Amino acid sequence: MSQELDKAYEHDKRVKKVFRLRIVYNKKGCIASDHCVLSDPYDFKLDDEFKAILIDGKEQEGPVKGIFVKEIETTEPHLAINAAKTCTPKVIAIIDMETGKRIAP
């Protein structure tokens, strides 16, 4: 991701802009490194096998199983973005719902 995109989503305490983001998570690819939980404990937690769970995520219907999606509104987009950036196997994607563009990883 370019520096320009990073700056667009930086946390600014003076501005309480609400970002509408979609988190897409492929649980099958998770290797239990726990980086997402450390980066964003509001959207991720660990299951009994230490794989990440997208809290309140809905599994997508279709032939590919294990893909979970959650739409959020947040004034702190850096949490979800950092979860995607620090994910070792890169199985988390963040999409800006206003533009439709993938912003992380």
Image: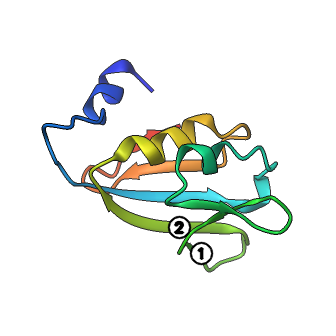
Residue type at the position of mark 2: Val
Residue 39: x %, y % from top left: 55, 43
Q: Which quadrant of the figure has residue 72?
A: bottom left
Q: Taking 7 as reference, is 54 left or right? A: right
Residue 66: x %, y % from top left: 72, 69
Q: Taking 99 as reference, is 22 left or right? A: right
Question: Of the residues under marks 1 and 2, which one precedes in the sequence?
Answer: 1
Q: In the figure, 87 relative to 98: above or below?
A: above
| Residue where numbered disc 1 is placed | 60
Mark 2 surroundings within 10 Å by alpha-carbon count, few (fewer than 14), some (14 through 19), many (20 or more): many
Q: Taking 79 as reference, is 16 left or right? A: left
Residue 77: x %, y % from top left: 36, 46
Secondary structure category for the residue under label 2: strand
| Residues marked 1 and 2 touching at CB (< 8 Å) | yes
Residue type at the position of mark 1: Gln
| Residue where numbered disc 2 is placed | 69
Q: Nearer the viewer, residue 64 or 30?
A: 30
Q: Nearer the viewer, residue 55 or 102?
A: 55
Mark 1 surroundings within 10 Å by alpha-carbon count, few (fewer than 14), some (14 through 19), many (20 or more): few
